[in-house]
């Protein structure tokens, strides 16, 4: 039995009364005050997440842009310096190895931010390509801590602590600055569907930064948020989760990520397979649905139409914002019609649901 | 903390015996461990409950938990209010959060239940193991 990894904020979480769980080999807070309370705090005020378990891979050298662009479906050559993109990263069959954010410092310097549960796998995947390019690739996850402050009041709370003008950082852009005196990469990104920032910095400053941001946000009602609410927040916004909506036998075209797949750019891993799939017809489609009868859809529950199994639930939950039970599912593409009635098989019984459009939740302007 | 007029099980259910009838729910410890309860599935009036077998489900945001019958009997009433307000289980596990009322079919099973002192000892032991 291997021991679980801990971020530099473990003690702070324990002290705050967090319920700690095993998340992909990390001992992480699933909740503090409660998932529903934390979810609402992020939607209406602000919440602070410890996301230091995420992985960071640094790519530098003359071949950096070329290699990154070979790895991802989206187009890193279209990024300006200081800009970020989201992309699936595919295998040769067009399945998904991981989904990630790509930060462009310059044509010769990129930062890849990957899922915590896939860090080792992704690094091995990236490294095997490196010899073909003039690059240095480093897994800097252990040297990088990360906090996310998310919610409509995030900028208001963070600005007094920050020495740069946050209003100049647009969505999916980043800059370097000092937050509470700590050097940070500051990006306007997040995984909640709200406005907010992600801060990357050296782990020795984690506790200090955590306490400073929470203190600064106290009057505005900012609170620490666990992974439980992180999941309900991203799910309402229909942001995919690797292992649920994405996997090595699910293509980005099936998962509704077609806008991030640039088939008109030069070759990339999976391009051939995806071009074939796009040309023929995409076999499955990710749909959103709401329950009509009583029941909560959960990952892996079968989905059926007139008793015939057509797919499965990828993520499902009670939605705190919408106050109803909703789900995402991967089904036969020909059955994917908005308004169609389907069944979710819950504990052996078919429970009625209806396909609805996505996203379930979109923040107001 | 745990009412002394109730009996308890290892699976964190409570039972209030009233003659040949009994009311069943889950303890405050159980609701706290579950987190926010967002869905409760209860049996139908007339269903037979068998001791130690699941008779219902309490779903939290993250998980589905079976609720086990502390003793055998026939369902005489269910707490329908929980169907629309499952959070009542969190707010008042020992009172308004009651789940089913049954007619006992085998009162001898009552002897195997824990009293409040024994239940609290069980909780202390579970805490210590962590």
Image (cartoon, rainbow, N blue to C red):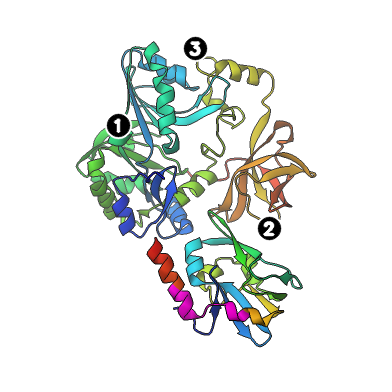
Mark 1 sits on what residue?
A175
Residue A309, percent from left and from top? 74, 40
Q: Up-down: is B110 above or below A205?
A: below
Along the line of sight, the residue nearer the viewer: B97 or A38: B97
Q: Up-down: is A36 above or below A315?
A: below
Q: Main secondary structure of the magenta part?
A: helix
Mark 3 neighbour class, 10 Å CA radius: few under 14, some 14 to 19, many 20 or more: few
Chain under disc 2:
A
Horizontal relation, residue A355 to residue A45: left or right: right
Q: Which secondary structure, mark 1?
A: strand
Q: Which mark is residue A266?
A: 3
Residue at the right extreme, as displayed: A306
Chain under disc 3:
A
Same chain, labels 3 and 1: yes
Q: Which secondary structure, mark 2?
A: loop
* Residue B120 shown in magenta: yes
**Residue pictured at 48% horizontal, 63% vertical:** B33
Q: Which mark is residue A294?
A: 2
Same chain, labels 2 and 1: yes
Horizontal relation, residue B86 to residue A179: left or right: right
The span shown in magenta is B110-121
Query: What's the CA distance linking mark 3 and mark 1?
Result: 29 Å
Mark 3 vs 1, N-terminal side? 1
Instruction: Report if the CB atoms under discs 3 and 2 are less than 8 Å apart.
Output: no
């Amino acid at each position: 039995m291997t021991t679980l990894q801990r971020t530099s904020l473990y003690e702070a979480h324990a002290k705050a009364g967090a319920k700690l769980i095993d998340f992909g080999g990390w001992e992480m807070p699933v909740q503090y005050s409660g998932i529903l309370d934390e979810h609402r705090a992020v939607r209406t005020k602000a919440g602070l997440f410890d996301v230091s378990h995420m992985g960071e891979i640094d790519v530098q050298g003359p071949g950096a842009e070329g290699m990154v662009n070979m790895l991802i479906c989206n187009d890193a050559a279209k990024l300006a310096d200081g800009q970020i993109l989201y992309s699936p990263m595919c295998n040769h069959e067009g399945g998904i190895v991981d989904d990630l954010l790509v930060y462009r410092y310059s044509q010769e310097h990129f930062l890849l931010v990957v899922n915590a549960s896939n860090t080792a796998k992704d690094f091995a995947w990236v490294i095997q390509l490196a010899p073909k390019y003039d690059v240095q690739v480093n897994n800097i996850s252990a040297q990088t801590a990360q906090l996310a402050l998310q919610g409509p009041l995030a900028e208001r709370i963070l600005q007094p602590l920050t020495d740069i003008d946050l209003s100049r950082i647009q969505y999916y852009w980043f800059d370097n600055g000092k937050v509470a005196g700590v050097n940070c990469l500051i990006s306007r990104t997040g995984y909640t569907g709200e406005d907010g920032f992600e801060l990357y910095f050296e782990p020795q400053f984690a506790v200090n930064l955590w306490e400073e941001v929470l203190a600064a946000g106290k009057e505005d009602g900012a609170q620490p948020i666990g992974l439980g609410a992180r999941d309900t927040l991203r799910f309402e916004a229909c942001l995919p989760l690797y292992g649920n909506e994405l996997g090595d036998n699910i293509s980005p075209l099936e998962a509704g990520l077609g806008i991030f797949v640039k088939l008109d750019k030069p070759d990339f891993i999976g391009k051939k397979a995806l071009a074939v799939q796009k040309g023929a017809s995409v076999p499955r489609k990710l749909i959103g649905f709401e329950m009509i009868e009583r029941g909560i859809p959960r990952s892996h529950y079968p989905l059926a139409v007139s008793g015939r199994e057509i797919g499965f639930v990828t993520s499902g939950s009670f939605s705190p914002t919408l106050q109803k039970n909703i789900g995402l599912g991967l089904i036969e593409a020909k059955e994917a019609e908005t308004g169609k009635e389907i069944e979710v098989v819950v504990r052996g019984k078919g429970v009625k649901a209806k396909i609805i459009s996505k996203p379930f939740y979109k923040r107001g302007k | 903390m745990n009412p002394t007029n109730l009996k308890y099980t290892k699976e964190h259910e409570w039972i209030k015996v009233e003659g040949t009838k009994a009311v069943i729910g889950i303890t405050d410890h159980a609701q706290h461990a579950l987190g926010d309860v967002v869905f409760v599935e209860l049996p139908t009036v007339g269903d037979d409950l068998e001791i130690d077998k699941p008779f219902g489900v309490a779903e939290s945001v993250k998980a589905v938990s079976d609720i086990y019958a502390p003793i055998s009997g026939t369902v005489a009433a269910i707490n329908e209010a929980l169907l629309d307000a499952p959070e009542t289980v969190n707010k008042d596990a020992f009172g308004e959060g009651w789940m089913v009322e049954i007619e006992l079919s085998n009162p001898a099973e009552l002897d195997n239940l824990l009293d409040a002192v024994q239940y609290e000892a069980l909780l202390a032991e579970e805490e210590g193991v962590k």
